[in-house]
Image (cartoon, rainbow, N blue to C red):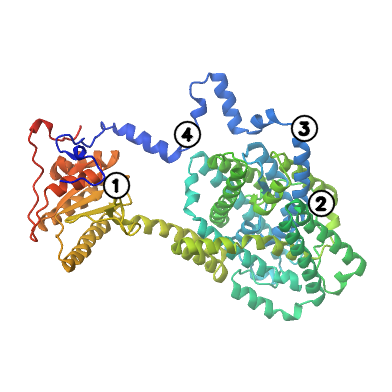
Amino acid sequence: MSKVGSDAGANDPATRRPIGIPDKATPLKDLELAARETFFPDDPFRPFKNQPRSRRLQLGLNYIFPPLQWLRSYKLSYLKDDIIAGLTIGSLCIPQDIGYSKLAGLPPIYGLFTSFVPPLIYALLGVSREIAIGPVAVVSILLGTLASHQLPVPTLATKKCDTTSLKFINDACTQYRESYLALIFTATFFAGIFQAALGLLRLGFIIDFLSHAAIIGFMGGAAVTIALQQLKGMLGISTASFTRKTDIVSVLRSVFQHVDEWSWRTALLGLFFLGFLLLSKFIGKKNKKLFWIPAIAPLTSVILSTLFVLVTHLDKHGVAIVGKIDGKINPSSVGRFMFHGEILKKALRVGFESALIALTEGVAIGRTFASFNNYQIDGNKEMIAFGTMNIVGSCTSCYVATGSFSRSAVNYNAGCKTPIANVVMSIMVLVVLAVATPLFHDTPNCILASIIINAVLTLIDIPAAIKVFKVDKLDFISLMAAFLGVLFISVEIGLLIAVCVSVANILLQVTRPHSAVLGRIPGTSIFRNVEQYPDSSRIPGILIVRIDSAIYFSNANYIRERILRWLDDENDQIKKENGIPFQFLIIEMSPVTNIDTTGILTLEDLRKTLQKRKVQLAFANPGTMVIQKLNDAGFVADVGNDWFFLTVDEAVEVCRRHLTLGHESTTPHVPAFSDESKAPHLQS
């Protein structure tokens, strides 16, 4: 018989190399391997191997406190870069923090608190050199939305009660604001606990359940929601009278229900400075060397608008201003924690959801900038750092902090070398807290609104959404589901939809794995998907199918039905062409990484079904774990050792020798060997 693309002797049954089955590991060894691959895929203990005790202690301290490692190689020239970067992101974060605190339903001072303590803790424990720590828009709006849903304003507090202001309305309002602060601080504490626990237990893979597409959709929807929320500031509508809901319908209805509060002076001032900020961002994008222009534009806007209000007295003509900000350094908030009653249950829920988004955003930012500078980020170590800084932050009047993409990008472009840039930013915020908060008294609220709108527009990544649409339509459905969920329902429901759609996508891939019919590439012994390579030739009487997935209880029945459907479809085509009916089915097993007992039983059922159809089942290149389990289950012996092959080519050549060339097939026989001692066998 002629050989296509292979040596004739290579497929001689007498010389065919048997499939190897490795020695079965002990159950304890299997468990150890599974645990190591699940929780320690990055092998964090590798540097500790074969090291003396003193060296291990030093490596352990370096792991816990990364500055001990990078400070050894720190140069004086780095300090200049870090100071410039720190001052730059400080000038950006101060006006943003005042606005972001309002998104969380907090007075402006708490945004500044959150940019003082957490960055210092992260600089001590974090790995990323470029990430800028502080409050961010998405986490702020999520935290504020969740907290307001869990703790609605009581009737006795009246409609004028506003958690972003400390003005006295009545005793009920004051009591409500205290409860709201208690919920925020307790939720932040639990957010830190959740984050640190995920890192310590090596469960960082959990955040990977949020797909990149779902994150794009969630962030985009949150950005639109946040921008729409700022219409109240841009138009001069009071926060107390504005809706606390975040869906687009409720926000727009609230905007038009309060037309009597609109202020043309406020709108004109806000739009002017929004245009100024957008122009600054455009200049920065056009010329990377001018990155500092969009970085200082927010603080410049605050200074100019504040001076304008002071000169023109617009605050007496309907332009709302920030008002008094108590100048003090982070006070302790431990006494406000509530670890009992309804507040505890609400704080656990709010903290968990906030922790999830903060981790997802922070770790993604850290990994992104680490890839630019060719170093690795330990996701679990980052989670511990984030968790610790939020635990400490919750004790010092801070709410949930994480990495900010816009500030991190500015930090990176400013040439930061180490986390000392975060320390410089923190010191700058400290100075503002100590001596400069009175300067923000006359800052118009519309300027803060324009700063937030300008900041969140970067979260709407249209090019990324278009790319997702081109590459994967299922991913695009995930993206749009998260986007529309945030936009038309709520930030909380949008997050839930993002998680559910991501998990559903995973389940779909697991339960409906890809499979393909293979054909031989002309002139070779290589077999590939006939749809990908239309010129590949099919082997008469032999169907070759590849399963591109592990075979588990969740997909085993589908795989069986899909294989039989391949067989029926191909046979129908053969009948039309008056060809040879299939007598052999070869399953290419190399992509099958694992199989469970349900999968084995399903293959046994498939074998019996094929026997009734007088089709012989054969397997090519099963992996270590798969062949071991098939052998332990007795499936190898049932099928016959001689129907397991190293390659598809070898399986095809053996099957071709036993084809019945008539139109009616008979059950093929196991290959006969002239020398029984040379018959292939499975190694045990």
Quarter of the image with the C terminus is: top left
Mark-to-mark CA distance, 2 and 4: 47 Å
Q: Residue at x 49, y 55 (%)?
A: 210
**Is 102 or 283 nearer to us in this picture?**
283
N-terminal-most mark, 3 or 2: 3
Disc sitting over residue 76 in the figure: 3
Disc sitting over residue 524 in the figure: 1
Pointer 3 local density, CA inside 10 Å: few below 14, some 14–19, many at least 20: few
Mark-to-mark CA distance, 4 and 3: 34 Å
Residue type pointed to by label 4: Asp
Mark-to-mark CA distance, 3 and 1: 62 Å
**Is 63 or 461 nearer to us in this picture?**
461
User: Can you see residue 557?
Assistant: yes
Q: Mark 4 or mark 3, which is nearer to you? A: 3
Mark-to-mark CA distance, 2 and 1: 78 Å
Residue type pointed to by label 1: Thr
N-terminal-most mark, 2 or 4: 4
| Position of residue 492 measured from the top left corner of the image (x, y, whole percent) | 55, 62
N-terminal-most mark, 2 or 1: 2
Disc sitting over residue 327 in the figure: 2
Q: Quadrant of residue 77?
A: top right
N-terminal-most mark, 4 or 3: 4
Residue at the spot of label 4 = 43
Count of number-bearing discs: 4
Residue type pointed to by label 2: Gly
Where disc 3 sits, the SS reads helix
Q: Judge left or right: residue 318 versus residue 489.
A: right
Q: Mark 3 or mark 1, which is nearer to you? A: 1
N-terminal-most mark, 4 or 1: 4
| Position of residue 295 measured from the top left corner of the image (x, y, whole percent) | 76, 54
Q: Judge left or right: residue 674 versus residue 331.
A: left
